[in-house]
C-alpha cells in the first residue's frame, strides 16, 4: 500500500520531503554542503522553498543562542544562497530581526523597507517597544499595525 502512495506523489514532492528531513538533521559541519546540494536541484522553485524553510528554522534557533553563532552561520549561508534574491532578502531580514531581538542597532528605515512576512514576524515575536511602536504607527498592513498596538498594551 505504501508503494502505491509513493507512486502517486510527484517526484519533486518526495525530494522536498527528503531535503527537509536532511536539513532538519544536518550537522553544523555538513550544513553548507547540504544547502548547496539542495540549491542545485533542477526544480529551482522547490529548492528555494526547501532552503527558505531551513533558513527560517535555523535562524530562529540561532538568534536564541546569540549574535556570534548567528553571525558565523549567516556568513557561511550567504555564500550558499548568493544570486538568489529571495533567499538573500530572507537572510537579511533574519539578521535585522536578530538586531531587534538582541537590542543591537537597527534603523526605522530598515524595518519599514521589509516584507510583510518580516513585519508580521516582528510583531509576533519581538519584545522591543521601539520596533512595536514603529510598526503600530507605520506597519505596512492593518494586521501588523493592530497586532503591534495590542502587544504594546500592558498586561493585566
Image (tube, grey):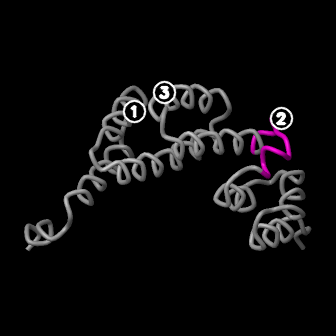
Q: Residue at x 14, y 66 (%)?
A: 6
Instruction: Name the residue beneath numbered marker 2.
Output: 105
The structure residue drawn at horizontal position 46% and vertical position 52%, both measured from the top left corner, is: 53
Q: Earlier in the sequence, mark 3 or mark 2?
A: 3
Q: Secondary structure at mark 3?
A: helix
Residue range (magenta): 101-112
Compared to 36, does 96 lie above or below?
Answer: below
User: Gap in Å between the C-alphas at discs 3 and 2?
Assistant: 24 Å
Quadrant position of the C terminus in the picture: bottom right
- Residue at mark 3: 79
Residue drawn at x 86%, y 61% as measured from the top left? 138
Determine whether 120 is above or below 69 in the image: below
Which numbered disc covers residue 31?
Answer: 1
Instruction: Give the numbered dot on residue 43.
Output: none
Tell whether label 2 touches label 3 (CB within 8 Å).
Answer: no
SS for tag 1? Answer: helix
Amino acid at each position: 500500500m505504501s508503494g502505491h502512495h509513493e507512486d502517486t506523489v510527484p517526484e519533486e514532492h518526495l525530494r522536498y520531503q527528503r531535503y527537509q528531513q536532511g536539513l532538519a538533521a544536518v550537522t553544523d559541519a555538513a550544513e553548507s554542503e547540504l544547502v548547496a546540494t539542495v540549491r542545485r536541484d533542477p526544480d529551482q522553485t522547490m529548492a528555494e522553498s526547501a532552503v527558505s524553510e531551513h533558513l527560517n528554522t535555523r535562524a530562529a534557533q540561532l538568534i536564541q543562542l546569540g549574535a556570534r553563532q548567528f553571525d558565523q552561520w549567516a556568513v557561511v549561508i550567504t555564500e550558499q544562497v548568493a544570486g538568489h534574491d529571495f533567499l538573500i532578502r530572507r537572510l537579511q531580514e533574519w539578521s535585522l530581526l536578530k538586531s531587534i531581538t538582541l537590542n543591537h542597532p537597527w534603523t526605522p528605515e530598515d524595518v519599514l523597507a521589509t516584507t510583510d512576512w518580516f513585519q508580521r514576524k516582528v510583531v509576533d515575536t519581538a519584545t522591543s517597544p521601539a520596533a512595536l511602536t514603529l510598526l503600530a504607527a507605520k506597519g505596512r498592513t492593518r494586521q501588523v499595525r493592530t497586532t503591534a498596538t495590542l502587544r504594546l498594551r500592558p498586561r493585566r
